[in-house]
Amino acid sequence: MKGFWKYFTDLRDIEIFLILCILLFSFTIILFVSLIITSRLNKIRKEIYRKKNTAHINQTLFSIAFDGATLQDFQNDPLFKRNWRRKLYKRQFLKELIKLHRLYGGEIALNIRKCYTDFRLIQLSYSKIRSRRWEIKCAGIQELGEMEIKKAVPIILEYTRSNNDTLKMVALIEVIHLSGLKGLTLLENYTEPLNDWIQLNLLESIKEANISEVPDFGYLLKSTNDTIVVFGLRLVTLFHQSQHLTTVKSLRNTPFRKINMQAGIAYHQLSATSAGKTIERENTLLQIHREINKPQQENSYSNKALLIVLFSAFSMLCIIISVYVFFYSS
């Protein structure tokens, strides 16, 4: 031990620095590889667990959907009781429940919604909304919308002003889904920008929805938010609300290019409609396709992985500089 310490103290500064850099780099590589292996093993373990429970979950869900089974009917099922304590099982159960609800309507859909509330899976959706990750928030909001949980609208409204365009779009779509077109009144005092990509998705969801009552969208044309005015013009055109022809005509003289252009399109189509010509609603969506801006891609890499890669690159750079100094400085 003393010999090793003497050997270490006799080293020059540059040699100590090189040894430390090599050790640091080796530790970083080992840590990085360990994280990759651990992550991979966790995914394999989850996949095995998922496949193991798929048949039992499908059997349980079909009993609920088609036979009207309740939570009490599964209290004596030891497999269900054991697995129900695990979050992984509940998440898989909820995922399959949502898939089943999208396939059926009528009494079957009502049984599935009842299961969603009775089994307290609604709490799982609320916990997703509280997540820090935007994609998990989106999943929670979509689950609440799919299950027709109208009391969740005030919570979803908080995310309609998010800085994340995808989260904002999902929140707006689900508010409209749960509240109908009257839910668009939130845009009256909306100060956030509503880009063309969000507007296109909103119009598509409105077009696909079963709308029984269409409100007057004239209030959107008076907004101080330019993007809301453009969206209002598109809604007025989509639903042929020609009573706003005078307002639309005045908007053609606005100095804002997008409003000016959309007002011209709206005025032309509303004038043709009032004259008795047939205008297809799809024309409004085609105009948006020409102007649409691609959404920014979200970074799919985790922050920890990026930090490790950057740290490894820095360590490698230090080693290269050290080797260069050691061999070429003299």
Image: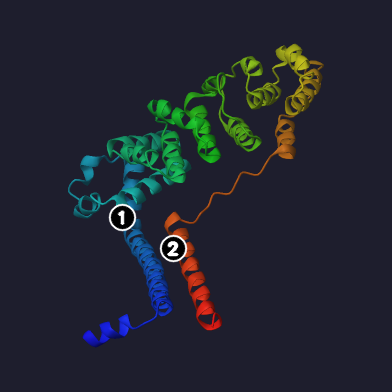
Q: Which residue is mark 2?
A: 308
Q: Measuring from the top left, give residue 19's x and y in whole percent.
A: 39, 78
Can residue 261 be seen from the camera position used here?
A: yes
Q: What residue do we see at 36% from left, 42% from top?
A: 66
Between residue 50 and residue 323, name the one nearer to us.
Answer: 323
Q: Which residue is mark 1?
A: 56
Whether 45 is drawn above or below 296: the answer is below
Can residue 104 be seen from the camera position used here?
A: no
Tag nearer the camera, 2 or 1: 2
Q: Quadrant of residue 181?
A: top right
Q: Amino acid at mark 1?
A: His
Q: Residues within 10 Å of mark 1 (few under 14, many from 20)?
A: few
Left or right: residue 118 compared with residue 264: left
Whether 182 is drawn above or below 99: the answer is above
Between residue 177 and residue 7, name the one nearer to us.
Answer: 7
Q: How many marks?
A: 2
User: Mark 1: which secondary structure?
Assistant: helix
Q: Measuring from the top left, give residue 18's x and y in whole percent.
A: 43, 77
User: How is the rendered protein coloured?
Assistant: rainbow
Between residue 303 and residue 135, name the one nearer to us.
Answer: 303
Left or right: residue 57 compared with residue 310: left
Q: Amino acid at mark 2?
A: Ile
Between residue 116 and residue 173, name the one nearer to us.
Answer: 173
